[in-house]
Amino acid sequence: MDGNGRWAKKRNLPRSAGHKKGAETLQEIVKGASEMGIKYMTVYAFSTENWKRDEEEVNYLMDLLRQYLKNELKEINKQGGKILFIGERNMLANDIVTQMENIEKQTAGNDKFTFIVALSYGSRAEIISGVKKISSLVANGDMSISDIDEKSFSSALYTYGIPDPDLVIRTSGEQRISNYLLWQIAYSELFFTKTLWPDFTVAELKEIVDDFNSRERRYGKV
């Protein structure tokens, strides 16, 4: 969800205003995606690299996250959505982690759609974590090296039990993956839009999904 800062700069507003508007956009997009029948949606909310930003901005983002966890995610629960979080939880404040765990428990029985929030997330860190888990199983004699395959490795990632993405959308005109779901998007379709995230709409999401549905996916086959 890229472009909050640039959206604010274009309007001579503080970056915090862009993040606030971005959170409002997210609420609309989640609701719209659910109504479109999308069963799984993952959003890149905060990366491990984002911790390097200005302390004031990071603190604002964490406070905004607290509000979002307290208020907006209740609406997703009402809509029948299951909420999951992936990322390095040990880097987050204890009260935020507690909120996340409570939300996951409260929505665990919902099955209309699944909303995944990548928070303090970095794909390289996730892959290294998976390697360590597999290595530990092998070292303890619970798994042999010959048992290691794509399925067993996928089960060691944060996204275990979640289907690989069919489509990845990046807003703001940037055309890079930025350490996001690198293992999982091996055969995902990619779509880059110049729209800044706060300006992204459900109508544009529908257009992108229509474009996706017109593509032929061969998964390496002829």
Image (cartoon, rainbow, N blue to C red):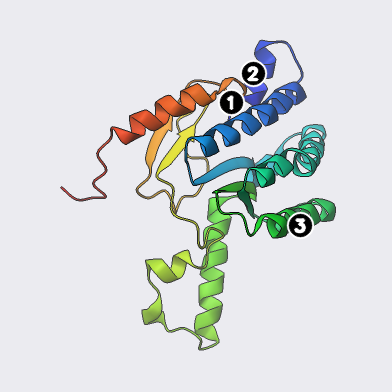
- Which residue is at a point 36% across and 29% down the rendered structure image? 210
Disc 3 or disc 1, which is closer to the eye?
3
The reply to whether discs 2 and 1 touch (Cβ–Cβ < 8 Å) is: yes
Residue indicated by mark 1: 197
Vertical relation: 46 (above or below) 197: below
Label 2 secondary element: helix
Left-right relation of 148 to 105: left
- Which residue is at a point 41% across and 25% down the rendered structure image? 207
Name the residue nearer the viewer: 221 or 88: 221
The image position of residue 1, as x and y in percent, is 58, 33
On the question of residue 1 being in view, the answer is: no
View extreme (bottom): residue: 141
Vertical relation: 163 (above or below) 8: below
Q: How many marks?
A: 3
Left-right relation of 179 to 104: left
Residue indicated by mark 3: 102
Label 1 secondary element: helix
- Which residue is at a point 38% across and 66% down the rendered structure image? 150
Left-right relation of 87 to 140: right
The amino acid beneath tag 2 is Trp
The image position of residue 50, as x and y in percent, is 67, 40
Disc 3 or disc 2, which is closer to the eye?
3
The amino acid beneath tag 1 is Trp
